Image (cartoon, rainbow, N blue to C red):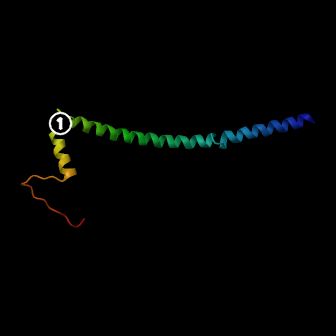
Amino acid sequence: MTSKWAAGAMSLTVAYFAYHALAGEQGLGQWTDMQAKLTAKKAELATLQAGNAALQKDIARLTPGQIDPDLVEYLARSELNFVYPDELVIVDSSQ
């Protein structure tokens, strides 16, 4: 009679661990979800690093002693809406 109880207990133990290995908090299902999140985060990191590299390049072009006049003019025109006195400004009111 003891062997039936032992076999039942062993079966329940194996079933318990098998369930948690597949569907538990750190099981196979959760692992695949985490792999998908990791892939998305790596793509986001690559995008952020590319943006950071572009900003570092702009910073290097604006450091004192090495200022790029073309970048300064571009920034003044695009960000501050500066124009030369002899330029003609056309305002599009349809937007």
Amino acid type, callout 1: Ile
Single out the residue that lies furthest toward the top. Answer: 65
| Residue 2 occupies quadrant | top right
Image coordinates for residue 14, horizontal then vertical, percent: 76, 37
Taking the view exactly as shown, the residue that stands out farthest to the front is 64
User: Looking at the picture, how far across and down is residue 22, in whole percent?
Assistant: 66, 41
- Quarter of the rendering containing residue 56: top left
The C terminus - image quarter: bottom left
Query: Residue 29, relative to residue 3: is it above or below?
Result: below
Please, what secondary structure does the residue beneath circle 1 have?
loop
Report the front residue among 39 and 75.
75
What residue does disc 1 label? 67
- Residue at 58 percent of width and 40 percent of height: 31
Q: Using residue 19 as the reference point, say whether residue 77 is left or right of it.
A: left
The location of residue 41, given as percent across then percent down, is: 46, 41
Query: Badge 1: few (under 14), some or many (20 or more) residues near its Cα, within 10 Å?
Result: some
